[in-house]
Image (cartoon, rainbow, N blue to C red):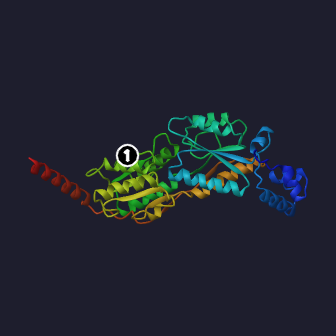
Amino acid sequence: MTARSVTLDDVAHLAGVSYQTVSRVLNHSEQVSPRTRAKVEAAMQQLNYVPNRVAQQLAGKNTRTLGLATSDLALMAPAQIASAIQQRAAAQGYHLVIAMANASSAPQDTVNELLAQRVDALLINLPLDAQQAEQIQLQCGNKPTLFLDVERSAMVAQCQYQSESGAKQAVDHLVALGHQQIGVLNGPERSASARARFTAWQQALSAHRLTPFCVLSGDWSAASGYQAVLAQLPDKLPQALLVANDQMALGAMRALHQHGVNIPAEISLIGYDDTAESAWYQPPLTTVRQDLQQLGAISVDRLVAQLEGGTLADERLETELVLRETTAAPQQGQVNVRAIAQQLQALARRLSST
């Protein structure tokens, strides 16, 4: 025989209030005094009461539930954004439901997972072009929906970091050090963020009458950064490399370390995001900072404001360059000397085997 679930009546009886008062507390009504709210919350805790969100959904009530459609949480930036969103949602009295996309699913399928749970509003942190975003907006109907990784031209509400300021600071910094051969390791073409960063880098380089020395690409993972740089070794390295996120920069650093390339004496690196671990790389990574905690908090605040009667406005946040220890002035000729030495070693091995 299973134990009976605790009901609102049980909470009301223990707290000495009406059923309606308990319901108001659950719905965060301002009509309840702080003293009464504290009594009801204490009764809930004592009885281990868990709100029945399914029943609230079936009754058509606001469940104070937000939905987050996100990219792979194995990647650092989406994971940190999701964490920030969850923390802010809880502080605002909202529950968060997360649906994570996979390589074989369409973005619309991930959003449908959230809509099936009757969330009150949605945050979409998936790489989308304008057409995809506008289709998802129609799919969500009149539910407040905010997009975090979308082409700027999309006619949807957006909360994103601007790429121009951080990209310009990164390029200006490298040029000021004396670098002219500046390469790019970008994210996947399908990502609006990757495309925006690449365009911003191109514009910043063009202002110095430069073009990218090489254009590499990865899928945001450290492994892809490792493989992309490995393919350039030993003799095709630029003097400096702009990397579209910190995880790919970590992989790039591993490949360089394995082949005896000194950072920053032989190549300078600048990452992107300033994730929590980037200050602990060896050497600590110079990177373009996006405050992911701020992004999560502001995006939740924008949605909650609309749910509570406000309007959902676009938010453009600024990036900044964080200087650490992976950039330095170029040492002319050192990369070519290393390449020649490695080629001579390879030739010696071939000759010794014949």
Task: Choose top left, top right, bottom left or bottom right for residue 133.
Answer: top right
Q: In this view, does 284 lie above or below 206?
A: below
Tag 1 secondary structure: strand
Residue carrying label 1:
215
**Residue occupying the point 67% across, 49% down:** 96
Q: Is residue 40 above or below residue 223?
A: below
- Relative to residue 96, is residue 252 drawn left or right? left
Along the viewing direction, whichever of 353 and 222 lies nearer the viewer:
353
**Residue occupying the point 68% across, 36% down:** 116
Q: Where the N terminus falls, by quadrant?
A: top right
Q: How crowded is mark 1: few (under 14 residues within 10 Å), some or many (20 or more)?
A: some
Residue 169 in picture, x, y percent from top left: 47, 59
Q: Is residue 58 above or below residue 213?
A: above
**Residue occupying the point 55% across, 50% down:** 78
**Residue occupying the point 67% across, 52% down:** 300
Count of labels in the image: 1
Residue 294 in picture, x, y percent from top left: 61, 58
- Relative to residue 7, is residue 159 drawn left or right? left
